[in-house]
Protein backbone atom coordinates (compact mmCIF):
# COMPACT_ATOMS: atom_id res chain seq x y z
CA UNK A 1 0.00 0.00 0.00
CA UNK A 2 1.65 3.27 -1.03
CA UNK A 3 1.08 6.50 0.95
CA UNK A 4 -0.75 8.06 -1.98
CA UNK A 5 -3.16 5.16 -2.16
CA UNK A 6 -3.90 5.39 1.51
CA UNK A 7 -4.36 9.15 1.45
CA UNK A 8 -6.65 8.78 -1.53
CA UNK A 9 -8.83 6.52 0.63
CA UNK A 10 -9.45 9.36 3.04
CA UNK A 11 -9.26 12.31 0.67
CA UNK A 12 -12.98 12.94 0.39
CA UNK A 13 -13.23 13.22 4.19
CA UNK A 14 -10.36 15.69 4.61
CA UNK A 15 -12.16 18.59 2.97
CA UNK A 16 -15.21 18.54 5.24
CA UNK A 17 -15.68 21.30 7.82
CA UNK A 18 -14.44 20.57 11.35
CA UNK A 19 -18.00 20.68 12.60
CA UNK A 20 -18.89 17.81 10.30
CA UNK A 21 -15.70 15.85 11.04
CA UNK A 22 -15.67 16.28 14.84
CA UNK A 23 -18.20 13.48 15.59
CA UNK A 24 -15.89 11.03 13.76
CA UNK A 25 -13.35 11.58 16.51
CA UNK A 26 -15.57 11.40 19.59
CA UNK A 27 -17.83 8.98 21.38
CA UNK A 28 -20.61 11.13 22.79
CA UNK A 29 -19.05 13.78 25.02
CA UNK A 30 -15.73 11.97 25.20
CA UNK A 31 -12.88 12.50 22.76
CA UNK A 32 -11.74 9.34 21.07
CA UNK A 33 -8.91 10.93 19.08
CA UNK A 34 -7.69 14.52 19.30
CA UNK A 35 -6.88 15.86 15.83
CA UNK A 36 -8.08 19.52 15.79
CA UNK A 37 -8.57 22.17 18.44
CA UNK A 38 -12.05 22.64 16.94
CA UNK A 39 -13.06 19.38 18.69
CA UNK A 40 -12.92 21.13 22.07
CA UNK A 41 -16.06 22.73 23.39
CA UNK A 42 -16.07 25.37 26.14
CA UNK A 43 -17.45 22.95 28.79
CA UNK A 44 -14.87 20.32 27.77
CA UNK A 45 -12.02 22.84 28.03
CA UNK A 46 -13.17 24.00 31.44
CA UNK A 47 -13.44 20.39 32.63
CA UNK A 48 -9.95 19.52 31.36
CA UNK A 49 -8.44 22.59 33.00
CA UNK A 50 -10.04 21.70 36.36
CA UNK A 51 -8.83 18.12 35.94
CA UNK A 52 -5.30 19.39 35.23
CA UNK A 53 -5.48 21.42 38.48
CA UNK A 54 -6.47 18.30 40.43
CA UNK A 55 -3.70 16.17 38.90
CA UNK A 56 -1.22 18.95 39.66
CA UNK A 57 -2.31 19.01 43.30
CA UNK A 58 -2.42 15.23 43.77
CA UNK A 59 0.99 14.70 42.16
CA UNK A 60 2.55 16.84 44.91
CA UNK A 61 1.95 14.26 47.65
CA UNK A 62 3.40 10.79 47.79
CA UNK A 63 -0.02 9.28 48.32
CA UNK A 64 -1.68 11.25 45.50
CA UNK A 65 1.20 10.48 43.20
CA UNK A 66 0.89 6.76 43.94
CA UNK A 67 -2.84 6.87 43.23
CA UNK A 68 -2.31 8.60 39.86
CA UNK A 69 0.35 6.04 39.01
CA UNK A 70 -2.04 3.13 39.33
CA UNK A 71 -4.66 4.57 36.96
CA UNK A 72 -3.16 3.55 33.62
CA UNK A 73 -0.34 1.24 34.67
CA UNK A 74 -1.78 -1.40 32.32
CA UNK A 75 -1.43 0.90 29.26
CA UNK A 76 1.47 1.70 26.95
CA UNK A 77 1.98 4.80 24.80
CA UNK A 78 3.91 5.21 21.54
CA UNK A 79 5.38 8.65 20.91
CA UNK A 80 5.87 8.80 17.14
CA UNK A 81 7.60 12.11 16.50
CA UNK A 82 9.13 12.44 13.06
CA UNK A 83 9.49 16.23 13.37
CA UNK A 84 11.70 17.97 15.93
CA UNK A 85 10.18 18.51 19.36
CA UNK A 86 11.45 19.12 22.87
CA UNK A 87 8.61 20.28 25.11
CA UNK A 88 5.70 18.51 23.46
CA UNK A 89 7.58 15.22 23.43
CA UNK A 90 8.88 15.45 26.97
CA UNK A 91 5.70 16.75 28.53
CA UNK A 92 3.62 14.04 26.86
CA UNK A 93 6.05 11.38 28.09
CA UNK A 94 5.93 12.88 31.60
CA UNK A 95 2.11 13.11 31.45
CA UNK A 96 1.84 9.42 30.54
CA UNK A 97 4.27 8.51 33.31
CA UNK A 98 2.28 10.49 35.90
CA UNK A 99 -0.67 8.23 35.07
CA UNK A 100 1.51 5.11 35.29
CA UNK A 101 1.81 4.41 31.55
CA UNK A 102 4.99 3.11 29.99
CA UNK A 103 6.20 4.97 26.91
CA UNK A 104 8.20 4.08 23.88
CA UNK A 105 9.30 6.33 21.02
CA UNK A 106 10.14 6.52 17.34
CA UNK A 107 11.85 9.81 16.52
CA UNK A 108 14.21 8.84 13.77
CA UNK A 109 12.80 7.16 10.68
CA UNK A 110 16.23 5.97 9.60
CA UNK A 111 16.08 3.36 12.39
CA UNK A 112 12.47 2.38 11.63
CA UNK A 113 11.24 0.04 8.90
CA UNK A 114 9.97 3.10 7.05
CA UNK A 115 13.61 3.32 5.90
CA UNK A 116 12.99 -0.04 4.15
CA UNK A 117 9.96 1.30 2.36
CA UNK A 118 7.22 0.55 4.89
CA UNK A 119 4.29 2.91 4.58
CA UNK A 120 3.59 5.19 7.56
CA UNK A 121 0.08 3.68 7.63
CA UNK A 122 1.56 0.22 8.17
CA UNK A 123 3.84 1.63 10.89
CA UNK A 124 0.82 3.11 12.56
CA UNK A 125 -1.07 -0.13 12.42
CA UNK A 126 1.90 -1.91 14.00
CA UNK A 127 1.96 0.65 16.81
CA UNK A 128 -1.67 -0.12 17.46
CA UNK A 129 -0.73 -3.80 17.87
CA UNK A 130 1.83 -3.11 20.58
CA UNK A 131 0.57 0.07 22.25
CA UNK A 132 -2.68 1.49 23.59
CA UNK A 133 -2.21 5.12 22.54
CA UNK A 134 -0.33 6.84 19.71
CA UNK A 135 0.86 10.40 20.23
CA UNK A 136 2.20 11.72 16.95
CA UNK A 137 3.92 14.66 15.32
CA UNK A 138 4.36 13.93 11.65
CA UNK A 139 6.00 15.76 8.79
CA UNK A 140 3.18 14.51 6.55
CA UNK A 141 0.30 16.99 6.34
CA UNK A 142 -3.08 15.58 7.53
CA UNK A 143 -1.50 12.26 8.51
CA UNK A 144 -2.84 12.37 12.08
CA UNK A 145 -6.34 12.91 10.72
CA UNK A 146 -6.00 10.00 8.28
CA UNK A 147 -4.73 7.78 11.11
CA UNK A 148 -7.86 8.68 13.07
CA UNK A 149 -9.99 7.46 10.14
CA UNK A 150 -7.90 4.32 9.83
CA UNK A 151 -8.33 3.53 13.55
CA UNK A 152 -12.09 4.11 13.24
CA UNK A 153 -12.20 1.73 10.31
CA UNK A 154 -10.25 -0.92 12.26
CA UNK A 155 -12.64 -0.54 15.21
CA UNK A 156 -15.67 -0.85 12.95
CA UNK A 157 -14.33 -4.16 11.61
CA UNK A 158 -13.63 -5.50 15.12
CA UNK A 159 -9.89 -5.08 14.80
CA UNK A 160 -7.52 -3.52 17.28
CA UNK A 161 -7.74 0.27 17.29
CA UNK A 162 -6.15 2.88 19.58
CA UNK A 163 -6.63 6.61 20.19
CA UNK A 164 -4.53 9.05 18.15
CA UNK A 165 -3.37 12.34 19.67
CA UNK A 166 -2.09 14.98 17.29
CA UNK A 167 1.02 16.58 18.79
CA UNK A 168 1.44 19.10 15.95
CA UNK A 169 0.73 18.59 12.27
CA UNK A 170 2.13 20.69 9.44
CA UNK A 171 1.14 24.32 9.68
CA UNK A 172 -2.48 23.39 10.43
CA UNK A 173 -2.96 22.42 14.00
CA UNK A 174 -1.43 21.89 17.43
CA UNK A 175 -4.46 21.18 19.60
CA UNK A 176 -2.68 20.09 22.79
CA UNK A 177 -0.51 23.22 22.75
CA UNK A 178 -3.73 25.25 22.50
CA UNK A 179 -5.12 23.31 25.47
CA UNK A 180 -2.10 24.10 27.65
CA UNK A 181 -2.15 27.71 26.48
CA UNK A 182 -5.79 28.07 27.52
CA UNK A 183 -4.95 26.42 30.85
CA UNK A 184 -2.09 28.90 31.35
CA UNK A 185 -4.22 31.93 30.45
CA UNK A 186 -7.05 30.75 32.72
CA UNK A 187 -4.64 30.40 35.62
CA UNK A 188 -3.02 33.76 34.93
CA UNK A 189 -6.44 35.43 35.00
CA UNK A 190 -7.72 33.62 38.05
CA UNK A 191 -5.75 36.23 40.04
CA UNK A 192 -5.60 33.81 42.92
CA UNK A 193 -2.74 31.40 42.43
CA UNK A 194 0.34 32.96 44.01
CA UNK A 195 2.64 31.48 41.38
CA UNK A 196 0.60 32.31 38.33
CA UNK A 197 -0.60 35.70 39.43
CA UNK A 198 2.41 36.61 41.58
CA UNK A 199 1.63 39.84 43.41
CA UNK A 200 -1.89 40.00 42.00
CA UNK A 201 -3.46 37.67 44.49
CA UNK A 202 -5.28 40.77 45.75
CA UNK A 203 -7.81 40.91 42.96
CA UNK A 204 -9.85 43.63 44.71
CA UNK A 205 -6.86 45.89 44.92
CA UNK A 206 -6.12 45.34 41.25
CA UNK A 207 -9.68 46.29 40.40
CA UNK A 208 -9.20 49.73 41.93
CA UNK A 209 -6.93 50.55 38.98
CA UNK A 210 -8.82 48.35 36.46
CA UNK A 211 -12.50 48.57 37.44
CA UNK A 212 -13.71 46.50 34.47
CA UNK A 213 -11.30 43.63 35.18
CA UNK A 214 -12.97 40.21 35.40
CA UNK A 215 -11.54 36.84 36.30
CA UNK A 216 -11.11 34.42 33.41
CA UNK A 217 -10.67 34.76 29.66
CA UNK A 218 -14.01 36.38 28.74
CA UNK A 219 -13.63 39.99 27.63
CA UNK A 220 -9.85 39.94 27.30
CA UNK A 221 -7.67 41.53 24.60
CA UNK A 222 -4.99 39.12 23.48
CA UNK A 223 -2.16 39.88 21.07
CA UNK A 224 -0.31 37.41 18.86
CA UNK A 225 3.03 38.57 17.49
CA UNK A 226 5.47 37.14 14.94
CA UNK A 227 4.89 34.40 12.38
CA UNK A 228 1.11 34.38 12.41
CA UNK A 229 0.41 32.44 9.23
CA UNK A 230 2.80 29.55 9.80
CA UNK A 231 2.28 29.31 13.53
CA UNK A 232 0.08 26.25 14.08
CA UNK A 233 -0.06 27.13 17.78
CA UNK A 234 -1.52 30.53 16.87
CA UNK A 235 -4.17 28.96 14.65
CA UNK A 236 -5.20 26.39 17.25
CA UNK A 237 -5.19 28.78 20.23
CA UNK A 238 -7.07 31.58 18.43
CA UNK A 239 -9.89 29.13 17.74
CA UNK A 240 -10.12 28.13 21.41
CA UNK A 241 -10.09 31.75 22.55
CA UNK A 242 -12.96 32.32 20.13
CA UNK A 243 -15.09 29.96 22.26
CA UNK A 244 -15.12 32.72 24.91
CA UNK A 245 -17.35 35.82 24.74
CA UNK A 246 -16.20 39.37 23.98
CA UNK A 247 -12.70 38.43 22.90
CA UNK A 248 -10.52 40.86 21.00
CA UNK A 249 -7.55 39.34 19.15
CA UNK A 250 -4.80 41.55 17.75
CA UNK A 251 -2.46 39.93 15.22
CA UNK A 252 0.89 41.68 14.90
CA UNK A 253 3.09 40.55 12.01
CA UNK A 254 5.03 41.99 9.08
CA UNK A 255 2.68 42.85 6.21
CA UNK A 256 3.91 39.94 4.11
CA UNK A 257 1.52 37.17 2.97
CA UNK A 258 3.89 34.45 4.27
CA UNK A 259 3.69 35.82 7.79
CA UNK A 260 0.42 37.75 8.13
CA UNK A 261 -2.99 36.54 9.33
CA UNK A 262 -4.43 34.23 6.66
CA UNK A 263 -7.89 34.96 5.28
CA UNK A 264 -9.42 31.61 6.29
CA UNK A 265 -8.46 32.00 9.95
CA UNK A 266 -9.62 35.62 9.97
CA UNK A 267 -13.02 34.61 8.53
CA UNK A 268 -13.40 31.80 11.05
CA UNK A 269 -12.71 34.16 13.94
CA UNK A 270 -15.06 36.83 12.62
CA UNK A 271 -17.77 34.18 12.22
CA UNK A 272 -17.22 33.28 15.86
CA UNK A 273 -17.85 36.98 16.76
CA UNK A 274 -14.26 37.77 17.70
CA UNK A 275 -13.18 41.40 17.34
CA UNK A 276 -10.19 40.81 15.02
CA UNK A 277 -7.51 43.49 14.56
CA UNK A 278 -4.36 43.41 12.48
CA UNK A 279 -1.27 45.53 13.14
CA UNK A 280 2.17 45.61 11.64
CA UNK A 281 4.18 46.73 14.65
CA UNK A 282 4.12 46.28 18.44
CA UNK A 283 4.31 50.08 18.53
CA UNK A 284 1.00 50.52 16.68
CA UNK A 285 -2.02 52.24 18.10
CA UNK A 286 -5.65 51.26 17.87
CA UNK A 287 -8.78 53.02 19.09
CA UNK A 288 -6.48 55.96 19.83
CA UNK A 289 -4.32 54.10 22.37
CA UNK A 290 -0.99 52.26 22.09
CA UNK A 291 -1.57 48.57 21.45
CA UNK A 292 1.01 47.42 24.01
CA UNK A 293 -0.87 49.21 26.82
CA UNK A 294 -4.17 47.57 25.94
CA UNK A 295 -3.14 43.92 25.94
CA UNK A 296 -4.18 41.53 28.71
CA UNK A 297 -1.94 38.84 27.23
CA UNK A 298 0.68 38.76 24.51
CA UNK A 299 1.53 35.50 22.71
CA UNK A 300 4.94 35.88 21.10
CA UNK A 301 6.16 33.49 18.39
CA UNK A 302 9.37 32.97 16.47
CA UNK A 303 9.68 33.48 12.69
CA UNK A 304 9.71 29.91 11.31
CA UNK A 305 12.59 30.40 8.90
CA UNK A 306 13.02 26.68 8.30
CA UNK A 307 9.82 26.72 6.19
CA UNK A 308 10.99 29.47 3.82
CA UNK A 309 11.09 28.68 0.12
CA UNK A 310 14.06 30.13 -1.77
CA UNK A 311 11.86 32.98 -2.92
CA UNK A 312 10.56 33.67 0.60
CA UNK A 313 14.09 33.51 1.96
CA UNK A 314 15.08 36.31 -0.40
CA UNK A 315 11.99 38.42 0.26
CA UNK A 316 11.84 37.97 4.03
CA UNK A 317 15.55 38.52 4.60
CA UNK A 318 15.33 42.27 4.19
CA UNK A 319 12.22 42.98 6.25
CA UNK A 320 12.61 45.11 9.36
CA UNK A 321 11.74 42.81 12.27
CA UNK A 322 12.64 45.20 15.09
CA UNK A 323 8.98 45.92 15.83
CA UNK A 324 8.14 42.24 16.38
CA UNK A 325 10.53 41.76 19.27
CA UNK A 326 9.73 42.39 22.88
CA UNK A 327 12.00 44.73 24.82
CA UNK A 328 12.18 45.62 28.50
CA UNK A 329 10.84 49.08 27.75
CA UNK A 330 7.82 47.65 25.89
CA UNK A 331 7.14 45.24 28.76
CA UNK A 332 7.31 48.17 31.20
CA UNK A 333 4.35 49.71 29.37
CA UNK A 334 2.18 46.58 29.61
CA UNK A 335 -0.58 46.25 32.18
CA UNK A 336 0.86 45.13 35.51
CA UNK A 337 -1.11 41.86 35.42
CA UNK A 338 -0.60 41.13 31.69
CA UNK A 339 0.63 37.64 30.76
CA UNK A 340 3.47 37.15 28.29
CA UNK A 341 3.36 33.74 26.60
CA UNK A 342 5.43 31.88 24.01
CA UNK A 343 4.96 28.29 22.81
CA UNK A 344 8.76 27.98 22.57
CA UNK A 345 11.31 27.37 21.20
CA UNK A 346 12.31 31.02 21.15
CA UNK A 347 14.91 31.95 18.58
CA UNK A 348 18.10 33.02 20.33
CA UNK A 349 19.44 34.77 17.24
CA UNK A 350 16.23 36.53 16.30
CA UNK A 351 15.51 37.41 19.93
CA UNK A 352 11.71 37.83 19.97
CA UNK A 353 11.88 37.59 23.78
CA UNK A 354 15.31 38.46 25.18
CA UNK A 355 16.21 36.49 28.35
CA UNK A 356 16.36 39.80 30.26
CA UNK A 357 12.54 39.65 30.35
CA UNK A 358 12.44 36.21 31.98
CA UNK A 359 12.54 37.61 35.52
CA UNK A 360 9.55 39.89 34.95
CA UNK A 361 6.49 38.58 36.85
CA UNK A 362 4.50 38.90 33.63
CA UNK A 363 6.67 36.28 31.88
CA UNK A 364 4.61 33.10 32.00
CA UNK A 365 6.38 31.05 29.32
CA UNK A 366 8.35 28.66 31.50
CA UNK A 367 5.28 27.97 33.62
CA UNK A 368 3.33 27.57 30.37
CA UNK A 369 5.70 24.79 29.28
CA UNK A 370 5.31 22.98 32.62
CA UNK A 371 1.54 23.38 32.38
CA UNK A 372 1.81 21.26 29.25
CA UNK A 373 2.52 18.25 31.42
CA UNK A 374 -0.59 18.74 33.60
CA UNK A 375 -2.87 19.62 30.69
CA UNK A 376 -1.68 16.59 28.67
CA UNK A 377 -2.08 14.29 31.68
CA UNK A 378 -5.67 15.58 31.97
CA UNK A 379 -6.26 14.88 28.28
CA UNK A 380 -4.87 11.32 28.49
CA UNK A 381 -6.99 10.67 31.61
CA UNK A 382 -10.05 11.94 29.71
CA UNK A 383 -9.29 9.75 26.68
CA UNK A 384 -9.06 6.64 28.88
CA UNK A 385 -12.08 7.58 30.95
CA UNK A 386 -10.32 7.74 34.32
CA UNK A 387 -11.19 11.39 34.97
CA UNK A 388 -14.14 10.35 37.16
CA UNK A 389 -11.79 8.39 39.42
CA UNK A 390 -9.48 11.39 39.71
CA UNK A 391 -12.38 13.69 40.57
CA UNK A 392 -13.63 11.28 43.27
CA UNK A 393 -10.20 10.76 44.75
CA UNK A 394 -9.55 14.50 44.76
CA UNK A 395 -12.81 15.20 46.55
CA UNK A 396 -12.04 12.65 49.22
CA UNK A 397 -8.44 13.82 49.48
CA UNK A 398 -9.60 17.39 50.09
CA UNK A 399 -12.29 16.51 52.57
CA UNK A 400 -9.86 14.34 54.60
CA UNK A 401 -7.43 17.20 54.71
CA UNK A 402 -10.11 19.67 55.80
CA UNK A 403 -11.17 17.57 58.79
CA UNK A 404 -7.69 16.30 59.63
CA UNK A 405 -6.28 17.59 62.97
CA UNK A 406 -3.44 20.14 62.51
C1 LIG B 1 5.77 24.96 18.36
C2 LIG B 1 5.44 23.97 17.25
O1 LIG B 1 6.13 22.97 17.11
O2 LIG B 1 4.47 24.23 16.60
N1 LIG B 1 6.43 24.48 19.46
C3 LIG B 1 5.78 23.70 20.39
O3 LIG B 1 5.23 22.66 20.10
N2 LIG B 1 5.74 24.17 21.65
C4 LIG B 1 6.19 26.28 17.87
C5 LIG B 1 7.39 26.42 16.99
O4 LIG B 1 8.00 25.48 16.50
O5 LIG B 1 7.76 27.58 16.78
Image (tube, helix red, strand yellow):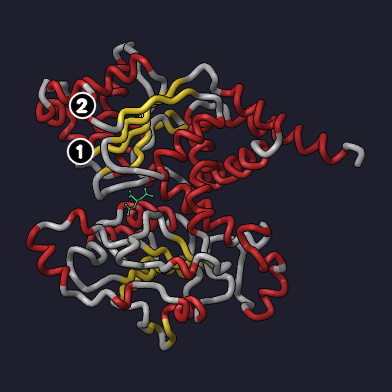
- Is residue 307 positioned above or below 123 on the image? below
> Taking the image as drawn, is residue 341 in sight?
yes
- Which residue is identified by label 1? 140
Residue located farthest toward the left when viewing the structure as drawn:
311
Q: Nearer the viewer, residue 53 or 363?
A: 363
Label 1, label 2: how far apart the Cα atoms are? 9 Å
The quarter holding residue 312 reads: bottom left
Residue 215 location, x and y as percent? 61, 63
Tell me: is circle 2 under 8 Å from ligand 1: no
> Taking the image as drawn, is residue 29 in sight?
no
Residue at 58% over, 23% down: 71
**SS assignment at label 2:** helix
- Is residue 349 positioned above or below 149 on the image? below
Taking the image as shown, residue 101 lies to the left or right of residue 153, namely: right
Residue at 39% over, 42% down: 39
Check contact, mark 1 vs mark 2: CB within 8 A.
yes
Q: Nearer the viewer, residue 20 or 36?
A: 36
Residue 53 location, x and y as percent? 62, 44
Taking the image as shown, residue 112 lies to the left or right of residue 197, namely: left
Q: How dense is the environment of label 2, judged by Cα within 10 Å: few (below 14), some, or many (20 and up)?
A: many
- Is residue 126 positioned above or below 143 on the image? above
- Which residue is identified by label 2? 120
Residue at 73% over, 35% down: 395
Earlier-in-chain disc, 1 versus 2 = 2
Q: Quadrant of the N terminus?
A: top left
Residue 309 location, x and y as percent? 11, 57
Q: How dense is the environment of label 1, judged by Cα within 10 Å: few (below 14), some, or many (20 and up)?
A: few
Residue 255 location, x and y as percent? 21, 73
Amino acid sequence: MSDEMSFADYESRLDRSIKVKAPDFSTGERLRHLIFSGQFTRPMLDKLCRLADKIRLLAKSNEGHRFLNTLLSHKRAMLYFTQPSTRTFMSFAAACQILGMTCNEVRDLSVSSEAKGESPFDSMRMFSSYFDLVIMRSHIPKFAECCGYMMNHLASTQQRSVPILNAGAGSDEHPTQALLDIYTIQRAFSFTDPKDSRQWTRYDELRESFPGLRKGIVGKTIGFCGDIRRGRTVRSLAQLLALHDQIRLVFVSPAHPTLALPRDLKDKLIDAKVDVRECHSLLDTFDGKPLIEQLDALYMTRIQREHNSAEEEAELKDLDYSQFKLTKSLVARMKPYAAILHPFPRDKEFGEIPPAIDEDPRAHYFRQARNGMWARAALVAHIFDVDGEINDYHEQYNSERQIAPQ
